[in-house]
Amino acid sequence: MSSRRRQSTNNGSRITDEQISDLLFRLRELLPEVHGRSGRRVSASKVLQETCTHIMSLHREVDDLSERLLELLATTETSSAQAAIIRSLLL
Amino acid sequence: MDDSSDDAGTGAGTGTTAGIFLPGARKRVKLSLVKQQQPREIHWKNPAQAKIYNLRLINSLRNLTIDGNGSKSQSPSSSSSSSSITTTKTAQSSSVGTKLPPSRAIKEAADSALAMTARGQTRWIRAILSRRRQMRKIVIAKPKVMKKWRRVEKEGGGGGGGRGGEEKKKKVKAKLKFLGHLVPGCTKASMVDLLEETADYVAALELQVRTMKALSDALSSASNVTTPPTLPPPFSS
């Protein structure tokens, strides 16, 4: 990555591969593991791709949930809504 | 416009993250990076934070519905202070006078509540909070991202035979760029910053999904249990 090297020389420091692999490993820990962990073979492109798909699925879930919340908030009356809110606070 | 472009990726605007991205202190960064990494994602898994976010989300949603009177439009109210990111439980509804489609309104409220719950000044938080003041342009820019992804996939499929060094780097670069479009406020971030932001953002999104799911489940169960008083009994004489 030539652009990355240019940045690093401007800052007077080097971004080591180890640092990047640590960050990628951290990301990978957050993601849901579909395929089995194959030792330390953490290829950058695969991690990035899984991250992208995971973020997109999370966005879609948020959209679906917000639609559902919209319907629920529209249909429930105020008294029952308050009761539900109090209940959810205790959860 | 954006605060994120000025700071050039420094996540230590208020010094809360102990200068992780200071350019001149990379040696110190390595040690502090290891220490600061753990608490950041644990912050989103903390159940206390989940409760705070839950409260804030509920309050902001309630303000939305009360102000909108069923039309769910966001009425101009007290402006939210984007500079002070504290964990107070006060609800701060948005100050935009434009009408949004209701689904977007809830999503924006959830995102803003999430951003306010966060500790530290990461890029995506600042982008979300600055977004609340300029809603129109950014909302329109979103749908373009999917088309780019398909183009990239086709190229990757075509050139998947020879995995030389250059090919790999191009692929990784393209994926990084796409990731930068996904995370708010990280279109022009360096690789290290982007990965850091992504990890934080993913943890925050998971908290958001969990909270909204719990809330919708609670609301749906409540609406199922309580019988609506408007329905007349079937055997009324």
Image: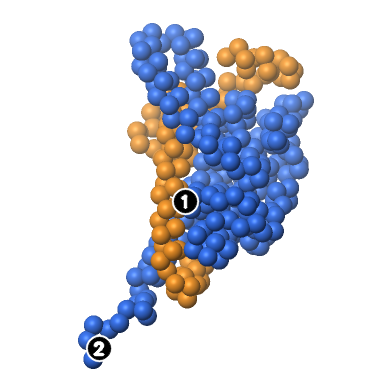
Q: Position of residue B87 (x, y in %)?
A: 67, 56
In this rendered view, identify the residue nearer to me: A20 or A4.
Answer: A4
Q: Position of residue B84 (x, y in %)?
A: 73, 51
Q: Residue at x 45, y 63 (%)?
A: A73
The quarter of the picture where the C terminus of chain B appears is: bottom left
Check disc 1 and report the residue beneath it. B103
Check disc 2 and report the residue beneath it. B236
The quarter of the picture where the N terminus of chain B appears is: top right
Name the element at disc 1.
helix
Q: Is residue B122 left or right of residue B153?
A: right
State whether residue B24 is above or below residue B214: above
In which quadrant of the rendered view does residue B129 lie?
A: top right
Subunit under mark 2: B
The chain coloured orange carries which letter?
A
Q: Is residue A41 left or right of residue B62?
A: left
Q: Residue at x 61, y 35 (%)?
A: B185
In this rendered view, identify the residue nearer to me: A65 or A46.
Answer: A65
Q: Position of residue B172 (x, y in %)?
A: 49, 20
State whether residue B112 is above or below residue B90: above
Q: Is residue B99 left or right of residue B210?
A: right
Name the element at disc 2.
loop
In this rendered view, identify the residue nearer to me: B136 or B11.
Answer: B136
The chain coloured blue carries which letter?
B
Subunit under mark 1: B
In which quadrant of the rendered view does residue B36 lie?
A: top right
Can residue B55 be seen here? The reply is no
Q: Residue at x 70, y 55 (%)?
A: B79
Q: Are marks 1 and 2 on the same chain?
A: yes
* Amino acid type, label 2: Ser
